[in-house]
Every structure is written in C-alpha cells, then in structure tokens.
Image: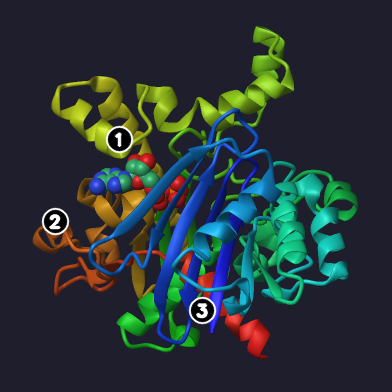
Amino acid sequence: MNILVINCGSSSLKYQLRNINTQRVMASGVVERIGESMGQITQRSFPDKWPDTKDTEELPILNHEAAMKLMVSKLTNGVIQSPHEIDAIGHRVVQGGESFSHPVLVDENVMNTIKDNIPLAPLHNPANLIGLEQAMILFPETPNVAVFDTEFHQTLPRHAYMYPVPKIFYEQFKVRKYGFHGTSHKYVSKTASVFIGQKIEETSLITVHLGNGCSMAAIKNGKCIETSMGLTPLAGLMMGTRCGDIDPAFHIFLAKNKGLPLSEIDILLNKSSGLLGICRKNDMRDIHEARLHGDDDAQLAFEMFTYRVKATIGAYLAILGSVNAIVFTAGIGENDPDVRSMACDGLENFGINIDPTKNNEKTAEARYINTEQSRIKVLVVPTNEELEIAKATAEVVND
Ligand code: ADP
C-alpha cells in the first residue's frame, strides 16, 4: 500500500511517498517559494538506496495547484508509473480544535470543520485546506485522511487546558490550550515504550521536542496530560525565533510605550525573539560555535534555552508523580549533547543521571543516554512525523 504524505504550507509543499508494507520511502520532496517569481522543487527518489538521486529544478510555480501537478509529474517520472499507484493520501493539518482527537477520513463535513477552525490557526489551516482541495481534484478516487497536530493533546484534563481568563472566551471562541507537535510526541512516545519494553498504556514519559519550534509533553500511561504550547505554537519553551512564555502584559508595554501595532508585536514575538532575539542566531550549532569564541550573548541564549527545558521537566515530574523515561527528539533534541546534559544537570536527586559517553555518541538510532544508576531512563528517539501520518492514514483507510 503506497501512502502519499502531504504537508502543505502557505508557500511550500512537503511530500513523502512511502510503501507502508515494506516501510520503504519511495520519494520525498519539497516545493518551495510557491507564488513567487522563481520557485523550486527538490525530490529525492528512493533516498535509502545508493546512489542517492537528488533532483532540483528551479521554475516559477504559480500556485498550489501548479505545485501539486509538479509533484505528480516528478513522482511519475521513475518512482511510480501512474498516480493510480497512490492508495491513500495523509495530510498534516495543524489545528483540529476540539473536533478531532483521531485521524479522520476527509469528507465535506470534515472540510467544513477544518474551515471552522481557521480563526484558531489563521496561517496554517487555510494552507492545509488548499492541499486537501487540490488532492481531491488531482486524485478524485483516492481517499484523503487528515492527521491533526493537536489531536494527541485532546486528552488534557480541563484544569490543564483552561486559561484563567473570563470563561466566556472558552465558551464562545474556544480559547484554550491545544498544544502542537502532537504527531511527533505521539510517535516518539510509542517508539520509546517499545524500546524500554513496556506497554504504552503502562508507560509515563516526558517527551522533549526541540527543533526550530520546541515543545514538551507529559504523558501518563500513554495519554498526554500536559503540554507546553498553547492556543498557538508561540507558548511554552524558548524557541529558535519564538519567545515562548512571557508576561502577557509585554504586549501592553509594547503598545503603550513603543506604539507598536498588533501586527508588529506578532512578528516581533514569532520571528525576532527566542534564540535569535537574544544572540542574533537561531541555529544551535552556530550558537555553540559563537560560545566557543567567547560570545556572551550566545552563552546567555544557551543558558536561557536549557533552563526553561529543565524547569518544564521539573513541572512535569510533579504533574506525573512517577516517570519511566525522558525522551529527547527533533533537530536539537536528537543531535545536541550539550543541550541535553545542561537541561538535565542538577536533576540527580530526582533520579535523572545522564552518562556523558552515551550522551556524546553520534548515531541516528534510538538509544539510552542515562547511567546504569539513573532511576528514570533518558532516551534519544529520532522523530518521524511522516511515518506516523502514513501509518495513521493506512489505519483509517483499512478500518
Ligand atoms: P523543524 O522544527 O523545522 O522541523 P528540526 O527538528 O529539523 O526543525 O530542527 C532544526 C534545528 O535543529 C536547527 O535550527 C538547529 O538549531 C538544530 N540542529 C540540527 N542539527 C544540529 C546539531 N548537529 N547540533 C545542534 N543542533 C542541531
């Protein structure tokens, strides 16, 4: 069974074609700068085979319809013979609101509900809808499945997801904590439970997703009970360019004292803050390089970033009561031993001990990085959101 996974953004389209029976990735690609004067498509065909076949083409790509057609023409140029070989399409949809706690087969009702959730994700859901609409036009007989970033966090208890603001905002506008990166937290929590040899229903974990965007989840017996992102992906940890949790009165300060309009405050907090705001760099590799050269702002950014991860681990230990493992994932979480050790430094009395040798190993495999004595296991698990979406899509279609 061949599953096409689509992640449609406002100016980009990421895709991956996978045979779910063999687990083999047949192609993965990205169409970028859709709607600009010059766009680009890059596709890797059979990326696990040697030699790697990377094909990049620059051309104007007028809109998402053109992007999808381009993707089809690349896929049918050596990877598959015809679009009929695609058995189902799995779509990443960012905001499912309270309507979706599981992946769903897309029909008109589902499309309308995703539309209804646009106010909660004004940048993402419209792009995801375009991807769905185009897929339905181009592949009229192929089932489409929507997999939501928010669905894994729908098990949060109400005392965790409600905001202490007048309740009418929840009742009328559904303002509450939703949480994001759910597909990643779900995937690494399932993988970690298999790795430590326990049933997911009996496993309690803290998952730490540190990429450009960063979030954490507290998972009790397989169910998410707390997460760091909120109504939007701006909340929680410090991120590459996003501020994470700050005093909400900062908005008022900026408006009153700097005369900034909301649109500029939005850009400031989403695109110019986080690591970038503190040290002018948002890639953790560059920050380490700068720290080595004595850049104190880079040192401060590193300390702030890891401090917030540690504080959240502490909070989640308290919420969960007992924890089997802490799981690091995503670009920084998988590759950065300094961030992992700093975030867990001083937590020995809570039963968390990192083994420096294991922590410094460079491998792309899931692995333990804790010492033998550590009561709580610490793992690195590479995330794979496309695989999770492909599996979920196959399950819905085969149901
Ligand atoms: P996204 O949120 O865009 O999916 P990723 O999970 O791919 O992001 O993470 C991207 C980030 O991972 C980069 O900005 C960089 O900071 C970090 N990163 C990637 N490789 C390394 C590495 N070897 N060491 C430290 N950080 C890394």
Residue 222: assigned label: 3
Residue at (58% x, 40% y) in the render: 234
Tell me the number on the disc at residue 302: 1
Q: Residue at x 53, y 79 (%)?
A: 2
Q: Earlier in the sequence, mark 2 or mark 1?
A: 1
The CB of the residue at mark 2 lies under 8 Å from ligand 1:
no
Placement of the N terminus among the 4 image quadrants? bottom right
Asked if disc 3 and disc 2 are in contact, CB closer than 8 Å, the reply is no
Question: Element at badge 2?
Answer: helix
Q: From the viewer's perspective, is 202 left or right of 347? A: right
Q: Residues within 10 Å of mark 1 (few under 14, many from 20)?
A: many
User: Which numbered mark, 3 or 2, is in the foreground of this view?
Assistant: 2
Q: Which mark is residue 360?
A: 2
Which class describes the residues within 10 Å of circle 2: few (<14), some (14-19), or many (20+)? some
- How far apart marks 3 and 2 lie (CA) works out to 29 Å
Q: Amino acid type of disc 3?
A: Gly
Picture coordinates of residue 84, whole percent (x, y): 63, 77
